Amino acid sequence: MKRIGVLTSGGDAPGMNACIRAVVRTAKYFGMEVFGIHQGYSGLINDDMVEMGMRSVSDIVQRGGTMLRTARCVEMYTVEGQKQAVKTLNDRGIEGLVVIGGDGSFRGAKCLSEEYGIPTIGIPGTIDNDLEYTDYTLGFDTAVNTCLDIINKLRDTMTSHERISVVEVMGRRCGDIALYSGIASGAEIIVVPEISYDMEDIVLRINRSRANGKHSNIIILAEGVGTSADFSKKLQSMTTYSVRGTTVGHVQRGGSPSMADRMLAAQFGNRAVRLLKDGIGNRVVGIHKNELIDMDIIEAVSMKKKFNYELYETLQMISM
Ligand code: F6P
């Protein structure tokens, strides 16, 4: 394979830039041409791309966001849009594609490879950590660290006022950001979409912790359950303690990637291009048990994300 393309799609994630860099530099190492496609699949459909070289990706390893910009492209769900994307690739002589994105982006990649025969490699780039085949997605670690920074600060003021803080974090339908932020921040309670909750039980737990000498509580709420505003209102109506809601919001999608995310970015990008160079497509790369892996894209997107109940129980045992 002599000419490839790379795009970032869906919500941006810290480490996407470092990953683009790894893709471009690996491609140049092997003497391949590489095109950076702007705004995800929209750039493919509208033929918006630029040829990249070694220096195009200088000084981006540490930057959040994505230099290629990103989009959620509805046209890619239509046959017309898909055909236009394939036409652009054919007209440009681009033989293989690297797609950095989440679940929705992988469905586009699967369609290009399965239905149109374009060798495509998916790199899991999303803060949500909602893909089952890989232990971690690119951006998750940095997003959790950003949440921790905010929760630490909230802890200071909540302790001072003896309040209850309800902190809403992202993750779409997946509770991993809440789970990891909860454990790592020492939050007393987490509420995730994977496990149903009972507000009376939460009040009981708060009362028990107060009886045990704790005067403030942190509750991490995954956005898949509801908003911190609604949850706080409901909780406030059932307790005499003062409740305050905070939404971390898009802050958790930005910022300089952590060491863990930069390492994933380098390895994912490098493996993706090595596969394409060998004429291998229709795969996704990931990390499992600390080992870099790649697997069939159809198999990967069909796997249902499992929640880590053991970690959830750990939090319950050590949090009060
Ligand atoms: O998929 C990443 C993510 O940040 C989710 O956690 C969140 O639900 C969603 O994207 C937010 O999307 P938008 O940036 O369009 O508001």
Image: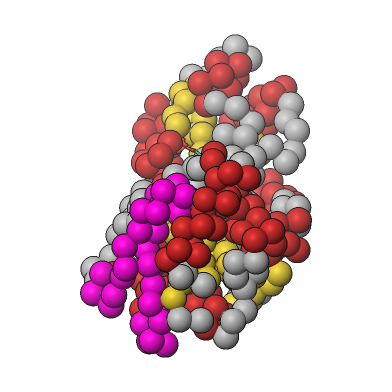
Task: Say which of 144 and 80 sits in front.
Answer: 80
Q: What stretch is highlighted in magenta?
A: 27-56
Tell me what residue is drawn at x 45 percent, y 54 percent. 44
Residue 89 relative to residue 55: left or right: right
The vertical placement of 120 against 203, above or below, is below
Quadrant position of residue 249: top left
Residue 152 in the image, given as x and y percentages of width and height: 40, 45
The vertical placement of 105 against 239, above or below, is below
Task: Say which of 121 and 231 sits in front.
Answer: 121
Residue 276 relative to residue 225: left or right: left
Residue 119 in the image, given as x and y percentages of width and height: 60, 70
Tell me what residue is drawn at x 64 percent, y 31 percent. 225
Q: Is residue 223 magenta?
A: no
Count of numbered tags: 0
Residue 117 in the image, given as x and y percentages of width and height: 65, 66
Residue 152 visible here: no
Q: Is residue 28 magenta?
A: yes
Residue 155 in the image, given as x and y percentages of width and height: 42, 39
Residue 278 visible here: yes
Task: Say which of 110 and 103 sits in front.
Answer: 110
- Seen as rendered, the residue at the extreme top is 237
In what quadrant of the picture does the C terminus appear?
A: top right
Tell me what residue is drawn at x 57 percent, y 85 percent. 278
The vertical placement of 184 against 258, above or below, is above
